[in-house]
Amino acid sequence: MELSRINVTWADYNEELEENLDKLITRLKRKSFKPIPAKRVYIPKNEKEKRPLGISALENKIDKLIMSRPVNHVVEADIRKFFDKVSHEELIKFIKIRIRDTSLLILIEKFLKAGYIDDGLLVRTEEGTPQGSILSPILANIFLHYVYWMNGLKKWLKKIRNKEKTKEWWKTLRAKLNGHFQYYGVSGNFRGIANYYKITIRLVHKWLNRRSQKRKMNWENFYRYLTHYPLPCPQIRHNFYTLSA
């Protein structure tokens, strides 16, 4: 690994800015760009604990700026060890719901696996995202968005399954799905709402079979039930690309 890429400053990079950017973009296009491990430092979290912080190399920051897009808001939450413990596999699975660009997905995985340098030693990362990276809050919001609605649906099904008759809470379930598709059913997001529908079907089948003193329902009977009492199917409700005359 070139020391110049690790220790280069903004001033140094700016001396031959156009050439350096051209070289960086060329490496990105050829998929030969390798993120430089972040330098790990520790800052005070409170009186007793310290929080790890990753200081990205300059080219890592530039590349992440190229990858990123403006956002209207970021939900801030202090989740214990989230940035160090989030599963790469689960995170990439959620990202793939919205992103199909293979090159971009490969680049994100490279950043996740780049590791960090702690006290002069290179530490490989199999989980987590480095704190201090400008991509971390974006990836965290993607991950937490899907975890939030999945956990919310799980809790609701668990709570309602024995309190009301199925035909009663089925109406509420239909309304929940309709509301989700009405809000998220926008151009380019069919894959996302279709995935939500699939997960909903699996969760409903699971919790129907956990009702007390009720006969188990296999998948064949469950699909037969859906034929008689269908749930709303995913569809795009708002087409932003329709041209008006």
Image (tube, grey):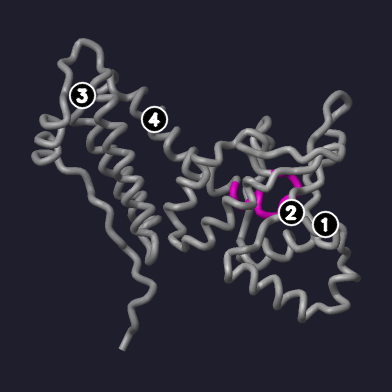
Instruction: Say the numbered circle drawn on residue 36.
Output: 2
Identity, as a three-letter code, of the amino acid under mark 1: Ile
Rendered location of residue 23, percent (x, y): 71, 74
**Residue at 58%, 69% in the rendered image:** 30
Is 158 covered by the magenta stretch? no
**Total count of labels:** 4
* Separation of residues labelled 4 and 2 (CA atoms): 40 Å
> Amino acid under label 3?
Lys
Q: Determine crowd level at label 1: few under 14, some 14-19, many 20+ residues with C-alpha closer than 10 A.
A: some
Label 4, secondary structure: give it.
helix
Which residue bears the numbered disc 3? 165
Residue 113, percent from left and from top: 63, 45
Q: Main secondary structure of the magenta part?
A: loop
Q: Check contact, mark 4 vs mark 2: CB within 8 A.
A: no
Residue 68: name its quadrant.
bottom right
Q: Residue at x 23, y 38 (%)?
A: 171
Q: Residue at x 66, y 39 (%)?
A: 125
Q: Secondary structure at mark 3?
A: loop
Q: Are marks 2 and 1 in contact (CB under 8 Å)?
A: yes
The residue that disc 1 covers is 6
Q: Is residue 131 magenta?
A: yes
Write the start and end of the magenta stretch as one range. 130-139
Residue nearest the viewer, comparing 163 with 88: 88
Seen in the picture, residue 19 relative to 229 is either above or below; the reply is below
Residue that label 4 marks: 154
Give the CA distance from mark 3 to mark 1. Answer: 63 Å
**Pointer 2 local density, CA inside 10 Å: few below 14, some 14–19, many at least 20:** many
Q: CA distance from mark 2 to mark 3?
A: 57 Å
Mark 3 or 4, nearer chain start: 4
Circle nearer the N terminus (1, 4): 1
